Amino acid sequence: MNYQERINELINRIEGYPLHEVVVELLVLWVVVYLVVRFMRGTRGARVAKGIALLLITATPAIRLIGSETEFERLNFLYAQFVTFAALTLVIVFQPELRRALVRLGESRIFRGGSLRTAQVIDELIASVSYLSRNKIGALIVLERQVGVEATVVGGTPLDAQVSRDLLNTIFWPGSALHDMAVVIREDRIVAAAVQLPLAEGEAFTSELGSRHRAAVGLTQETDALAITVSEETGIISVAEKGHLIRGFTPETLHAALLQALGQRPTPLTAPVAAPTNTPVAVPLTTTPEPTKKAS
């Protein structure tokens, strides 16, 4: 069978499909591809997936046009092995992204505590963050939600203390033994301080964003936690959620956002309405980072 006959056979086969089935299948495939591309955008394996997809798109028609399964057996065998290798490669390369996707599928309630306790914790947090921002004291506060961060807390200093503004201000005061790195809050308790978080990879950061912001984004890529940061250079308040950094909060807009995100029916954070005019907000981090030498 020559190439023209194979192409005609393929066209005839396509024309034999019912139109409504073709439309539904194309729509489903488009949605799946869109979601996959959106999920992979900015990840470390995005370029690998793009290269493998390009090879499959060009190799598959070529193999099918060259010969059937009984012709060119060695080429067909090598192609089948390549497809298997590509599938295994994608699983290995996207292991962190797949884990995050499964984690997000299992998310449910944000705080296990009651609404009154949540409101009290938020009030104490806002009072502390307001003080830290006003005095340009750097801080990183992690609010654990449904997915635990026990593996991260192990490296910190255990506290198990009630959340209070005075304690948070004391922890982050420059020169204190615990002011570096992060504080982790579970329900209404500060479970640990001086916790080192994983830094984000494959993300874009401006020169003013340093290790605190990278750590905040890095943790939220792996869990459903919220990470509040205060820049020690500008005093700008930022919140990281699901690998995205939202900047330019005021104490008032942060209070509203936390009530929204930690309520009985949590919803994703949105950019603050009253953000400073020169401050970027709701910035999706999707490109290769510029190296940063200083922490903010």
Image (cartoon, rainbow, N blue to C red):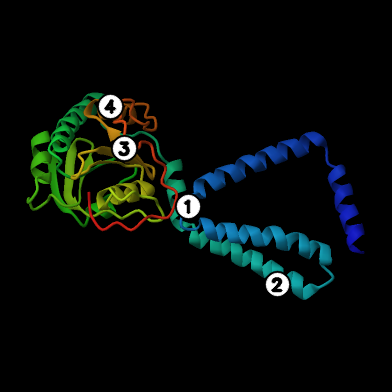
Q: Nearer the viewer, mark 1 or mark 3?
A: 3
Asked whether the residues under the numbered discs 1 and 2 touch, taking CB atoms below 8 Å apart as contact, a structural biologist would say no
In the displayed structure image, the side of residue 289 where residue 125 appears, left or right: left
Single out the mark in the foreground, 4 or 2: 4
Say which element carries label 3. Answer: strand
Q: Is residue 112 visible?
A: no
Which residue is labeled 2 in the image?
Answer: 78
Q: Earlier in the sequence, mark 4 or mark 2?
A: 2
Q: From the image, tell me which residue sits under label 4.
A: 253
Of the pair 82 and 111, the residue shown nearer to us: 82
Earlier residue among tags 1 and 3: 1
Q: Earlier in the sequence, mark 4 or mark 3?
A: 3
Task: Work out how far the residue at label 1 is from the one at label 3, CA to CA, in angstroms.
Answer: 27 Å
Front residue of 5 and 287: 287
What's under tag 3, amino acid-wise?
Answer: Arg
Residue 63 location, quadrant? bottom right
Mark 3 crowdedness (10 Å alpha carbons): few <14, some 14-19, many ≥20: many
